[in-house]
Image (cartoon, grey):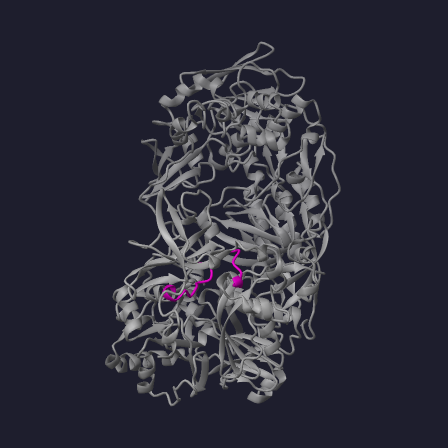
Amino acid sequence: MQSFPCPFCGPRPEPEFLFVTEMGKTRPEPAAEVSAPVWAAYLHDVKNIKGEVAEVWQHLPCGQLYLMRRDTTTMAVLGVQSFRKGGAA
Amino acid sequence: MLDRDWPAPADLSAFRLDLPGLTVMTIDPGAMTLVTGQLDAALSHFGLDQTHGWPGTASGPSYAIRTGIDRALVVGHDLAGGWHGAFGATEASDALTTFVLQGPAMSAALLRLGEISLTRPSASATFLFAGYRGVLYRHEDALRLHVSRPLAPAFAGHLEAVLADMTA
Amino acid sequence: MNFTFDGMDLTGRPGDTIAAALLRAQMRIVNRSFKYHRPRGLWGAWVEEPNAILDVTLNGVRTPNCRATTTPLAAGMAIESVNTALTARRDPLAVLDRFARFIPAAFYYKTFLWPSWHLFEPTIRKMAGLGRMDGTQDFVPAAPQRHETAELLVIGAGPAGLEAALAAARAGLDVVLVDDRDTPGGSLIDRAEHLEGQSPADWAAAMISAFRAAGGRYLPATTAFGAYDHGLFLLAQRRDHPAAPALIRLRADRAILATGAIERPLTFVDNDRPGILSLHAGQAYLNRHGVLAGQRIAILSTGDAQTAATQFRAAGAAVEVIEAGEGRAEVEAVHWFARHLRGLTLTDGRRIDCDTILASGGWTPAVHLHCQTGGKLDWREDIQAFVPRADRPQILTIGAAAGTFATDDARSDALIAARGDRPALRAQDPVRKAWPQLGQSRRAWVDFQNDVTVKDVELAGRENMRAVEHLKRYTTLGMANDQGKISNMPGLATMAAIRQVPIPEIGTTTFRPPFDPVSLATLAGPKREALFAPPKRLVLEPLHRAAGALMREYGGWLRPAVYTDVEAEVSAARDHVTLFDGSPLGKIDVYGPDAARFMDFIYYNTMGNLKPGRARYGFLLTEGGIVFDDGILFRLSEYHFSVSCSSSHVDQVANLLDLWRQDQFDPDRVFIQDATPHWATLTLAGPKARALMARLDFGIPLDDAAMPHLSVVQKDGMRIARVSFTGDCSYEISVPARAAAALWQRIVTTGRDFGLALQGVEALAILRMEKGLIFVGKDTDGTTMPHDLGFAAPREKKQVEFVGKRSLFTETASRPDRLQLVGLACQGAPLPVGGHATAPGQPASQGYVTSAAHSPTLGKPIALALIAGGLGRMGEEVEVYHLGQRRRATICPGCFVDPEWERLNA
């Protein structure tokens, strides 16, 4: 059970968090101009980097979506950043 | 599992645990409203000047607890549900069951609920204890814990189970 | 203290472990080995013990598979050996040892295969396993759990751990010290090693007093069994047998591991005979429990055994010390006769008579916790062992666990580590190697518990299972519940000799928690039985029960399944009016200036143009275009919507809305709040519903103009909506939960004149089925898109972007043979749900039945199904296959009752 920091709430145990996506996935729009391979990549492709990653996580109790940088080999948390004004306490 | 017989739950208004250094019971804290939006506007509507996080210093019958960046639980006031120009109000007087924990063993009790400590502050007073969502804060010399009413009977059983080994 | 072992009455002393008491009573044979049923005795004195796994019954409670060396003796215990047909002393299955060459490692891949493995499997499975459970005991009391924090966690209260803990506490750190023994001192106590002129017990007790005085917390009888990420350690705190240990989840900023080392056996022919123990265990039994392992002791050691020999002689034993290892004589044979060890013969011809052999092949540092979080190991040629690489400042290892065996050196290193610095490497005098010999004609044991011999490792080598993970899994070496504590190193060394490479090139397998077996009750904690997945409760549950309802779980809620009779309730809903508790239905508030635009993005259907006071049925899709939830959306005002989603999905939908709001929209212009638990919702449905509503007189007009189907009114703190889940004219009255009971009673009383009946969830399912109204997840699966359900208009016409839109136009989404929801008509009994539809006489599945029941309204069976291209195949016949039976059915529209939907406006 890891301990992750939420920018608003501080350090909390892992079960309070939801992994949302790898950072950098922009939703392709509008649908009529999106090719099938581009849409498939958005839905299914993940880089799954070994090492330093930037990820979007949600802290379930307060609901905030935010950026967390981690190292997937050492499990170290490298930093967090809120996407919102007033999102960091 | 789905064919399981469930006995009727006990009446929670009479719930009480007496443990060494700790009592737990339910109270009715009065009207409650959940607000979301521009919290300053919501607070001034209720005549309140701050929200409390964890551990917080709430007191009296009327106060606001911060539950998210733009969310709060207002206790002691109600307001018709809907959009009020800068914030939305959701009626919650019957949404939450309120437990009160009191006594010198409150910190030990928290360690049985989760990784929670009075010395580790949090801007939001919401927690996930073993799958139960709760709003937890200090009110005068006690702790108040709100959980969703439909899950309150199960949570009362959970409290009883996790606090059972508390020693003085 | 009186106890029994295999039916024999024996006596032990307070403070004895079961093993010490058995040894004191001269029970040489305590068990039978796993495969060959060879007699086995004690080897060790603590967690490293591989043989003495026993079933213990105390006060009527039977606990299987207790380790005798770590279980304290209690008066009245009835102890039984395991894995024997009779007793440890006499086991008819010992005859298996004669057939050893037919059951080597991995025999089950090669033998007992013809004519069929299943012929032999039941017998072999019955013979596998160790202890026996008591079938009448189905409840194990819960073990308590709690969290703790510390700035420094010190694991091990031997000399190194005690020094480190005390120094850190005196320096002002918040320190927790854990040790798996009841009393501190560790190996000092085993060896009766005096320190600073004091007995080890006195010295350790003084250290603990000072530690506590400095504010330290000491947890004895507590095993740190797992090290996890971010400084989390799991501790099992022993309680009185048979209670399972309490679990402590301790998060520490730093940890110091002073976990000691485990003595290695010597590998020679028949080294598994009872009476052969580890030298350190021999000392531990003497110095902790006052028990001599034997009267005529032969010590075989690669190290210095003079101190130990002196202690045994002082206690009255005759002792002969023999140097073992490289350059010394090997054991030629062990003499075993009439269930007793008689002596041994060495390769230089010497024959030594003895009743006990105490063997030491060196020491293996206990590196488990260091490795569990990814710590690496370095090979030390001087001590022939793996030691932790000091690569992380948060976890330091000191003392014997780091390969530093001298007590004074360990204590100095402890002070360095307490400051947070890494102790310097200390080279030792090279030890005498004593690794197993290859090519022996008779068996020498490597893993006692799983009965793995050197020959088995050689077999693995010949069969090309030469990588360390293959060696482990092929031979099962290190896989028993002692997890290779004494067998891993001899096994690695044997494979290194076979491959003719240095031992570090073989490497080790992955260390995983737990270090020591841990009871499932300890890990489970309070969430079991009724607390495991408790359903949510309705505020009206007492009234439902009083009305005779059968309460069952639906979508995470405990709800009335049926009050009287399902078909009668269905008929009442079609002929008169029913009252139904719809409280679980979600009510998620969406507010703000961008709320309308947000609803258009979230829903498949166009929602932004809903007028205040109106409602619309719609679908929530995943980005893959799959139907995730269906439900009604209410617009309560210009900037206020209420999402009424499925009762089983409320938390997920609320969270999904919050995610999209933050990701795709300006979170300062749209807001989400789950309002569900505040409300109770009472639903009236049926041709007399409107008349009953008029009689109840809520003060609102009920005509179609003022309140059309799919509209909502807010009045006096209530929300009254006209929506229908049954196809009949229907109203949902939502009130704060505390007002529900009074409203329910008023409706029941007033409803008598209208033939009102109470209606449960089972009847609702049939009413919906009659109208072709789906349950997401029952009538839809992981591929179902809204146009498969007949809702094609938004896909064709909705211009704005919404969740999942692009996925609705992929090649797969556009295929004509997609599974589409249709009805199936048949004769006789209802069709089997899950039965697959095929063209008559053809084998390939074309879809399957999703719902089926007898319709009381129509007096015939109805069914819904997902059929390939079904919407274009009306009138076609299919066969429905299920468990060897084939039924005929005809594809028809899914709405069986009132296909014109006229009953909605009754």
| Snapshot quadrant of residue C828 | bottom left
Q: Position of residue C686 (x, y in %)?
A: 33, 75
Q: Quick one: C631 or C676, which is closer to the camera?
A: C631
Q: Is residue C626 above or below residue C324?
A: below
Q: Quick one: C65 or C873, which is closer to the camera?
A: C873
Q: Is residue B89 above or below residue C23?
A: below
Chain part drawn in magenta = C769-787
Q: Position of residue C628 (x, y in %)?
A: 52, 62
Q: Position of residue C9 (x, y in %)?
A: 32, 32
Asked if the stretch drawn in magenta spans residue C777, the answer is: yes
Is the N terminus of chain B in the top left, top right, bottom left or bottom right quadrant?
bottom left
Q: What's the residue at 57%, 47% (across, down)?
A: C226
Q: Is residue C279 in view from this perspective? A: no
Could you tell whether B24 is left or right of C635 in the image? left
Our reading of the magenta stretch's main secondary structure is: loop
Q: Position of residue C209 (x, y in %)?
A: 56, 53
Q: How many dots with numbers?
A: 0
Q: Is residue C618 in view from this perspective? A: yes
Residue at the limit of the structure toward the front, as seen here: C875
Residue at the limit of the structure toward the top, as seen here: C349
| Snapshot quadrant of residue C148 | bottom right
Is the C terminus of chain B in the top left, top right, bottom left or bottom right quadrant?
bottom left
Asked if the stretch drawn in magenta spans residue C514, the answer is: no
Q: Quick one: C267 or C228, which is closer to the camera?
A: C228
